[in-house]
Image (spheres, rainbow, N blue to C red):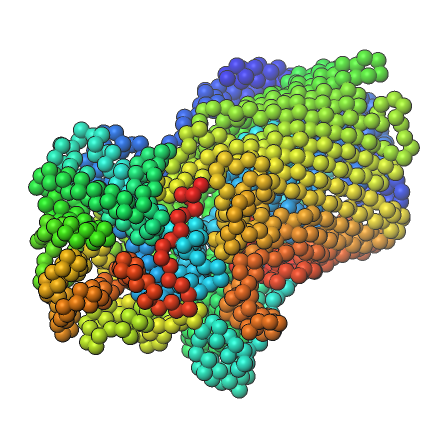
Amino acid sequence: MKTTKRHTFRLSLPVLLSFLLTTSCGVFDADPIQNPNNPSVESVLNNATKAQLQNLVTGLEFRHRATTASNNIYSTFGREIYPLFASDPRFVNQWVGVGEGADAENDPSFFGSGGTYSTPYRTVLQGNILIQSAEATDAVSAQEKSGYLGFAKTLQAYSYLIPLHGQYSNGIRIDVSDIDNLGPFLDYDAALQAIRDLLDEAYSDLSSAGSSFAFDLTSGFDAFSTPTTFAQLNRAIAARAAIYAEDWSGAESALSSAQPFFELASGESVMNKGGYFVYGNPPDQFNPFYYVPNTTAIQLPMAHPSFVEDAEEGDLRVAHKVFERNSAVTLQGLSSMYQDGRFESTGSPFPFLRNEELILIYAEANAQSGDLAQAVEAINLIRSTWGLDDFSSTSRDEVIDQILHERRYSLWFEGGHRWVDMRRYGKLSDLPTDGGQIYRFLARPQSELN
Amino acid sequence: MKTLFKTLAFLCLGFVSTDAFAQFTISGTVSDAATSEPLFGASVFEATTETGTSTDLNGQYEFTLPAGDYTLRFSSIGYVTANIDVSGENGETVEVNVTLQSSVANLEELVVTGLASSVKRSNLANAITTVNAEKLVEKAPTQTLDGAFKGKIPGVSIRSQDGAPGGGVNVQMRGISTLGAGTSQPLYVIDGVYVNNDAISNARFLTTGANSSQEDNSANRLADINPEDIQSIEVLKGPSAAAIYGQRANAGVVIITTKRGQSGDSRVSFSQDVGFNSALNLIGVAEWDEAKIDAYTSVLGGDAAAEKAAYNAAKSSGRIYDYEEILYGNRGLINQTSLSVSGGSGQTSFYLSGTHRTEDGIIENTGFDRSSLRLNVDHRISNKLRVSSRSSYTFTDNERGFTGNQNGTGGSIGYALAYTPTYAQLYPDAQGNYPNNPYFSDNMLSIVNNAVNEQKIQRLIQGVQVRADVYQSENTSVAVSLDGGIDYLTFESMVWMPTYLQNQRSSSNPGDVVHTLEDNFNANFQATASINTSISLGEQSISSSTQVGFSRFDQLQNRNVVRGQGMVAGQTGIANATIQSVISQSIVDVVDLSWFGQQEFNWSDKVIATFGGRYDRSSLNAAQDTYYFYPKASLAVNLLNFDGFSSDLFTQIKPRVAYGETGGLPNFGATFRSLSGGNIGGFLATFASTRSIDPNLKPERAKELEFGLDVALLDNRVSLEATYYKKEVEDLILDEQVPISSGISVIATNAADLENTGVELALNMIPVQKRNFGWNTTLLYWSNSSEITRLGIGGFSTGGFGTSLGNYLIQEGFSPSTIVGLPAVSDPSLYTIYGDAQPDFEMSWSNDFTIYRNVELSFLWHWKKGGDNINLSFLLTDAGGTSPDWNEPVEGSPFLKGADRLINGGSGAYIEDASYVKLREVGLFYTLPQSFTGSVVRQVKVGVSANNVLLFSDYRSYDPETSVFGTQAINNSVEVTPFPTSRQVVFNVNIDF
């Protein structure tokens, strides 16, 4: 027995050892582990291919779409909706301002306010990466490069407006290209000017971008798929920024450059021309504002009852935008019968800028610069489209009030226009408080204070 | 590198020519010195030949050794080990009868202190707690191994996240050692294999709308280990003891040893448990009547008239229900069958065991089944070469139910329960259709009966050890060992919300299923060379023990999560879904390499000094090929071994001091700046992720200084172990919140230092040791306090559900377990302080009584003083009007109590003291007299035992032990409608053949 055992051992040990010796080199060292799951940012910063740039362009659209994250909170601030999300009492307590200690203007960690700030700045970051990549590659011509830059800067400018709406008099940072050395906070006026300058810069880039982009955009940009048409979108955003800056002539001139996208005419299809966020089934995302009609889940935004109560008889916008449910949705003392009915399915697109807004910008700019007749004419293009009688007035204030009314109904729950509009005209106190508070702005986020 | 193996080869070949040897036989009886009772199962062991056996029921043993001189070690749990010299010539039979003294000091117990070395407890310089099988799992029912640690290890704070069957346990050793970047859980090493203890998410949050995978109520995977197979555990609580495990030891190390067979007659042991789970503590529910409905609806809304009509209709037809009792009041059956065979002869011994456990939870359709098979084999190839193998396979099937957080889907029955009044009608009609719950997004009864949350884990752990004595002379020995193994597990889970659930009917795509499949592979090995020498100078001797070695750890994890929405009725396959999505597909790949060395000097057992260190690198670090050094040193002095210090009273007085450093690694991915992928309108997007990187990121480093005094007296019938430690953790990795206008949210960076100081006391006594009555008692006390001593970034609050509901403050000068809420205040605390999650202290008291030699009674009390929870279950029951005290009036308030808290309470209303006293374990066992057992059956033991027997606490929920976010470094005391804790009572029969 013992002899056999030893014999076996003698045979196997050298085998074992030679195995160890031949494999030991790899055992005592290891190659660095690369990220097995994703490419790195660095991989596109130098000599990106056109295919990589295309992915970054789509990435910018992806980030741009996420800016709808501010819609619920701004629309609550402007009392366009009630945030009836039963999962967390803070939607009502904090946003409507009924809760103990709720104070959006002074709480740097105000509940649910991240979407008004972080999301748009992610779009800005993505735009900067696209610009950096497009500038540091030989894969595209100078003309094509201008297309990338014009596209990126336009969407960046669109995004900057969202935190600026929220921060308002606190101001925001515009120069955020170097994370270790972020630019200063600019006050509201300076920031708005910087945004308008960026739009002008983008407009100039687009004008030297030739007749077609070197990249493709989703169907949400079907009306703006070439440098020429995209430049009209750029001017439309510039017109929006101009009225915020109360630069009425600037708004008018931007609108004239936004033609033919900007069209002074009536009819639903004319109103709905514009830029859209598109949605789809996974791996794409659902329209975040689509809810099953009459859903029993208390987890949805509901139209503020005043939206229906204050409406003119026969205003088709109300019927198009909301429907009366079988039963009310009630949460924490807030109740509404009216659910958002704008979207047919989870795949319906959501508008981020429509011609209807441009017509109203046109009306406002004209009214403010004294051309009331033009303003009234524009107002009535809207009214006739939605089944309402013509409006007439020769009082500037009445016309402005009418424009605010039309904006309320035309742009309901499309990003929170009502809150911004009422603030622009010093009318926040006219909004219903619902037992809470109407905030003027949001506190500067905690991360910016450190 | 190759040189080591060449040397190994040379040395290995050198010892094959072992001579055949003449043998002699040793036999005798081992008995208790006080009672003269024979001791069953006492171990008799000869170290140089690794030969041994254990005593039979009559205390008798017999085995053979090659002719020569030996020292036999006689040991038994709870007795002072005796070393007896014997010598024998060929063919001789030597009788050695031994009596053993009872002991609580276990001075001779061997404790693992290095990666391939051990030292006897009397020479130990650290407070290393050893818990053997008897204390750990044999006195009370045990579901998971870590659950059985509770109250048995001073310095270790253990908290169950809830009562779901299958575990989920947060183990925190000596305070907080990370703020969440590194792992907060100890490293578990089972028979030399680094095992996976991840809490693997089943992505349930996707179907319930909860915020993240942290809220999935995942069980940590120590749940796959069969407690019946455990021989003992050793707990290296802090860096001073654990330094030799280097960069993975910041949260401590638990070394687990499984049972091994012993030569001699084969033993067969059969054990059957039958018992049940029942709720430890239900909260109760507020009553409803018309006045209450008015009070509720006037504050929280609703149609009072309609509610009153509903209430009166329910009342008149006698359909008022206590849904808490209906959901949680069930009894769940526990059944466990174990069979083990052990034995061995000549060069080989084995331990073979199989255990099958089934357990139903107190919520219907929940449960935990575990089947395991183990084979441990030890074999001597020659006198100088030994090999052992530890193999185990486990299959775990765990249904964990639907509790905890949700957002709007009703996918948590506890959450829905909080909003459901007693007059709600939720029972199905004659066709089995469940009505909608008008008070929340789903009908709890339908969720319990129709929704599925099941996970199945298959796991193979294989450890191998080879040990070769390559050189031996009178004073010097050299040994080489190779240790290692693999741990492979597959986790497969399904969460299914069928189409007909209320929340699914209201979805645009009814029917929701999430399948998760995760493979996890760990492999590690270490090669160690040890040299032991001793020099004698007259009566003094100095012995030296040196070890050097190399170790490597590899981890590869592959995780896939897929989801289907809009399902074909009754189907769970993704192919039957309208919307099919890949939620994640991700890989984790890690390599660690280490070199280590340790040197110990022992001067005649008077002074024992050790120093050593470990060089570690890991691919988790930003600098993947940089080695970081973790040193250690310790000193123990046995005063009574010095001349002139002898004492009649004391048997040991040992001051000791130890210092060590360990590391904590960044999370996988923290060093990569990625472009993420997404889809929009049929196009593929890549976009910058919101995480950026710090190229200088280093591992976290804990430095611990530990002082202690170990005293044993009265013939070792009393022992006291007292320890003070100061553990500083430097370079804590925090996700620095950069200004979010950069588009970046976080960068993992070395931003903070913190300090833990604490005291651990362990008093063991045998107050009575009589023939017919024995009493063994242990009193443990431990406390820890933490403070952030440096914070390189701005202070902030983190975790929980935001500051308005209470969360944790990370700020210099404060403990990271500080609980804060609104309103915000000026510096330094930023927010109002409402509490601290860390307890003031914990104590435990365990007692074992032996009565008439065959009745054993044991119990374990555990007291946690202080420590606050954020009790959001209570917030929800207040919002739903169901808190048991909701209807009580409040002086000076127009509101009733529940509404008053909700409206006027502010952040602090739901932050409350979570102190408790628990009777954790009770066991009563009776060993049948031998007259009842025949020649085949050696022993029959019957008993009844219970776990979580009694709870005394003012905490206003099921159990102060709760954590909706699972195992977390700091964010671990938030409660949201958990699975209520069970009391387990089990009847047991154990038969040894």
In this rendering, position of residue B256 left or right of residue A89: right
- In the rendered image, the vertical position of residue A321 relative to residue A218, given as above or below: below
The residue positioned 41% from the left and 40% from the top of the image is B738
Q: Quadrant of residue B50?
A: top right
The furthest residue to the bottom: B316
In this rendering, position of residue B759 left or right of residue B639: left
Q: In which quarter of the image is residue B660?
A: top right
Residue A60: x %, y % from top left: 25, 44
Quadrant including the C terminus of chain A: top left
Residue A202: x %, y % from top left: 18, 41
The residue positioned 14% from the left and 52% from the top of the image is A249
Front residue of A244 and A212: A244
Front residue of B101 and B911: B911
Front residue of B781 and B232: B781
Residue B9: x %, y % from top left: 56, 17
| Residue A341, visible in the rendered structure | yes
| Residue B990, visible in the rendered structure | no
- In the rendered image, the vertical position of residue B84 relative to residue B531, given as above or below: below
The residue positioned 51% from the left and 31% from the top of the image is B699
Q: In which quarter of the image is residue B676?
A: top left
In this rendering, position of residue B472 left or right of residue B592: right
